[in-house]
Amino acid sequence: MTKIAMITGAGSGVGRAVAKGLSAAGFSVVLVGRRKDALEETAAQLSGEALVVPADVGDPAQVKDVFAQTAKRFGRLDLLFNNAGMGTPAVPIEDLPFEKWQACVAVNLTGAFLCTQEAVRMMKAQSPRGGRIINNGSISADRPRPHSAPYTATKHAITGLTKSTILDGRPFDITAGQVDIGNAATEMTERMTQGVLQPDGKLAVEPRMDVRHVADAVVYMAGLPLDANVPFLTVMATKMPLYGRG
């Protein structure tokens, strides 16, 4: 039986790479993101079946519609990859506009929660029962960068969501894991090639790794039977200055 995976933030970067990896591994995929054109670009690069569903994951009604379309097309969901995320401008915490905080929380945290809610409902009701949820966390949750309070706070919260989902899903054959990523080469990290602010106040160019290594990690986690789980996995560019950042 073909397994069904949903990827949020599937129009670029990590989401696109993971969609390609899961498709190559035999999954049919549901591609979720704000921009239909970007999702269709991802779908065109896949080897298997794909359903494109444009949506804002921070909107409960739109999330419900995503899962309704998934149920109608495929009848079940085996994997949710909560990947949609955004940062905020790297400015001192006291200068960050409230609207930027709200937007970051809406996508990074509320979006993951809403998708998890609907996935759990679907996975509990389907036959055979169960499934897996993988959250895109961040090494920032453990060692934040300067001027990253909203992003870091949401990623701390994602760790709590992962742990709670593991516990609450246990009676229903639903489990969860988290991949914490350090400096994957995507559009979001392009600025690192020009230099990013370090804790000592200096700017430094940071090494990046091929994003396919993140995809490989997620495909590994997704391929485990439901009686085995990787709760937390970190994949990072070897020479990035994570160790020494705290």
Image (spheres, rainbow, N blue to C red):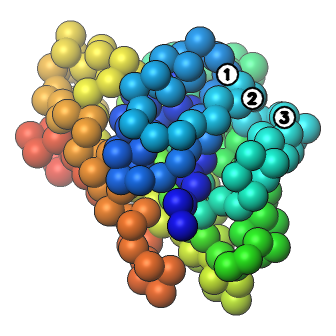
Q: CA distance from mark 3 to mark 1?
A: 11 Å
Residue that numbered label 3 is attached to: 62
Give the secondary structure at mark 2.
loop
Farthest residue to the right: give it. 61
Residue in the foreground of this view, choosing between 217 and 52: 52
Q: CA distance from mark 3 to mark 2?
A: 6 Å
Q: Which mark is residue 34?
A: 1
Please say if 156 is above or below 145: below
Q: Are marks 2 and 1 in contact (CB under 8 Å)?
A: yes
Please say if 72 is above or below 171: above
Q: Is residue 70 left or right of residue 164?
A: right
Give the secondary structure at mark 3.
helix
Residue that numbered label 2 is attached to: 56
Measuring 39% from the left and 67% from the top, which residue is drawn there? 223
Measuring 64% from the left and 16% from the top, which residue is drawn there? 35
Q: Mark 1 is on which residue type?
A: Arg
Q: Position of residue 9 (x, y in %)?
A: 56, 32
Q: Position of residue 141 (x, y in %)?
A: 45, 50
Q: Are marks 3 and 2 in contact (CB under 8 Å)?
A: yes
Give the secondary structure at mark 1.
loop
